[in-house]
Amino acid sequence: MTELPAGPYTAIWVYQGATPAVHVGDVVTVKGLVRDNAGRSEINLLYQADAAAVVTSTTTPPALFVTTVELAADYEAWESHVLTITDGMIVQDLMFGGFWLASSVESQLPVLFNDYFFDYATVELGDCYNNAFGMVTWYKNQWVFKVMSVEAVDCTVGNEGLSFGAMKRLFR
């Protein structure tokens, strides 16, 4: 859930233990127990008898865009935000449990991805993405980007110094 206007430190995870009766874009008034859940801030709607999420209106969800430099400078500022990392990213390592490590083409900074909302079976070593859309969260003592989608078309890559002769040899 994101407080408007959206920006750093304006989102929090809301937990109610079941599929919520709200939809993306709903403006909601929430009352619940604010707590730390394994390092992640959340509003928990399970424990208070008067806990509730009441829809008051709807709006267009904010579009948030960050670079890996902005993200690495203060991951906590973007915790629980749904956002787009605008850097081109190259998959560097496929890890156990639906995790993979990618690094920014622009800054070379690493981002740890998780398949919470995504089909990990489609990720391959060396894949290059123009950007990634998902949620930043604290999970198992590390910052993780729970990816929802990636754009793999026309991926950003660094320039190469290549002579015409060397380039022609690539196509012989």
Image (cartoon, grey):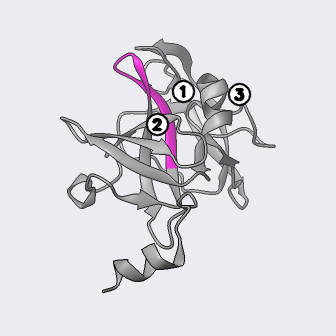
Q: Main secondary structure of the magenta part?
A: strand
Q: Which residue is mark 1?
A: 51
Eye-nearest disc, 2 or 1: 2
Q: Which residue is mark 2?
A: 111
| 37 w.r.t. 157: above or below | above
Instruction: Point out the image quarter for the C terminus.
Output: bottom left
- The kind of residue on which mark 2 rests is Val
Q: Gap between marks 2 and 3, in whole Å?
A: 19 Å
Q: Quadrant of residue 37?
A: top left
Q: Which residue is mark 3?
A: 9
Q: Quadrant of residue 16?
A: top left
Return the residue nearer the eye: 25 or 107: 107
Q: Residue at x 56, y 57 (%)?
A: 158
Q: Is residue 142 magenta?
A: yes
Which residue is situated farthest in the bottom direction here? 172
Q: What is the x, y in percent for residue 56?
A: 71, 50
Q: Residue at x 31, y 41 (%)?
A: 100
Q: Gap between marks 2 and 1, in whole Å?
A: 35 Å
Q: What is the x, y in percent for residue 71?
A: 62, 33
- The kind of residue on which mark 1 rests is Ala
